[in-house]
Image (tube, rainbow, N blue to C red):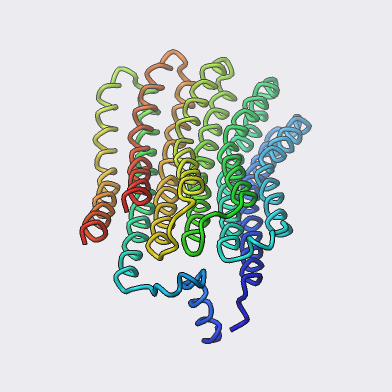
Amino acid sequence: MDASIMAAIVQAVAAQPEEVAASAIEGVDVIKAGALIGAGICMGFGAIGPGIGEGFAAGKACEAIGRSPENAGLLTRTMLIGQAVSESTGIYALVVALVILFGVVLGG
Amino acid sequence: MEVLTPEVWVDIGRYVGAGLALGLGGIGAAIGMGMAAASANEATMRQPVVQGHLMRTMLIGQAVGGSPSIFALVVGLLIFYMPVSPEEIGLPKAAALAGAGLAIGMGCLGSGVGCGWPASAACAGVARNPKRVTGIMSLMIIGQAMAQSPSIFATVISLILLFRPVTAIGMAGVGVAIGAGIAMGAGALGPGIGSGTTAGGALRGVSNWPRSQGITLRTMLIGQAVSQTPAIFGLLVAFIMMFALADLEPTIVNFAKTIGAGIAVGLGGIGPGIGSGLAGETACLASATRPRLDALVLRTMLIGQAVSQSTAIYALIVALILIYLV
């Protein structure tokens, strides 16, 4: 892309409307903005894997309970332990997102 | 630099929005219809005697499963041809047009794919059990209708984005429109697919064990309703952004926080939606096989789905912190 068009896009995105352009964007704001989008991406993508994985575990538990209902307690316990382990990456994502939000943005 | 006037931005928004709506919205329905056709071909090969029933089941399944792509077509054409009043011309309106395209395109992708599972399971079931064709077809239509509700949420949000006058100004307006679009669009993707797999499991069960149709229908409806929670979270966040954040300051921080909240709740809903659907699929099969164990299977399914939804709830919490505390 032509460098002048690129510059025009950056200018138009950053300085709309014109009266706000006077208060120029500071470096701190850019860091804060990056941290906010980063927190969103972190929690959003981090939630995909655990959601699908726990669904697999729950599905297999339903199937197994349908076959041998006398082991329902054991199967439910196994399902919950498996899901708790699978949940851990979702919790890591939550922790990282909260650290970004409360540490980087709200803290300083 | 007179190249990028506000009118040009609105045109860019139109092209991007209509392209996203029609491009993404067509993918899902095409995959779903292909699944139905593949299964109908296989079933006709096995049971050529019932090819009339099979053809009818496939065509009805494809017609119902194609409606998300028709929503996308209608909204895409609206995005492309909608008149914009002179005082609204600017970057926020352009973002609203593109955001409406994101919402409807991704929302219809999930529901379109989801409608393929019940249609293909119904074709296989009709071949196996031709006498039950009416029951199988009605269960297929109920399952597909449920799988389409995320795409209807997405249609509502995209129409509001298109027709509501833009109030937030500058970068805040851009963030609100794109963020609401991602929250609703990506948030509807997983639930659409998940509700479809649940309906597919119910149809496989009912075509093998037709006597347990009532119990399987109940398990399917409960499973689908739970797997649609992430879509409702997406809808909620999109509404909050469009109606409660109308007077945001146009700063880069507000732009980032609305986009971040949209990404968090939208993408965060994909996994839980699909996962709850997978749990629902086998639960429907189990309650069709052993209708007497229905209560136990339903309980296990609900516990499993609740745990699988927890990441969607984390995503909602992060989105609400982004919106209200930052």
Q: Is residue A106 left or right of residue B299?
A: left
Residue drawn at (34%, 61%) of the image: A38
**Which quarter of the rendering shows the C terminus of chain B?**
bottom left
Q: Is residue B66 left or right of residue A91?
A: right
For this rendering, which residue is in front, B136 or B241?
B241
**Which quarter of the rendering shows the N terminus of chain B?**
bottom right
Q: Locate residue B252, reporting x and y percent.
A: 40, 65
For this rendering, which residue is in front, A32 or B228?
A32
Q: Locate residue B199, reporting x and y percent.
A: 55, 32
Count every numbered label the image shows and give the total. Answer: 0
Residue drawn at (74%, 38%) of the image: B59
Q: Is residue A107 left or right of residue A43?
A: left
The quarter of the picture where residue B279 lies is top left
Q: Locate residue B239, reporting x and y percent.
A: 50, 43
Please identify the residue farthest to the right as the structure is shown.
Answer: B52
Residue drawn at (47%, 48%) of the image: B241
Q: Is residue B211 above or below residue A77?
A: above
Please identify the residue farthest to the bottom as the structure is shown.
Answer: A3
Q: Is residue B176 above or below residue B113?
A: below
For this rendering, which residue is in front, B225 or B284?
B225
Q: Locate residue B85, reporting x and y percent.
A: 69, 59
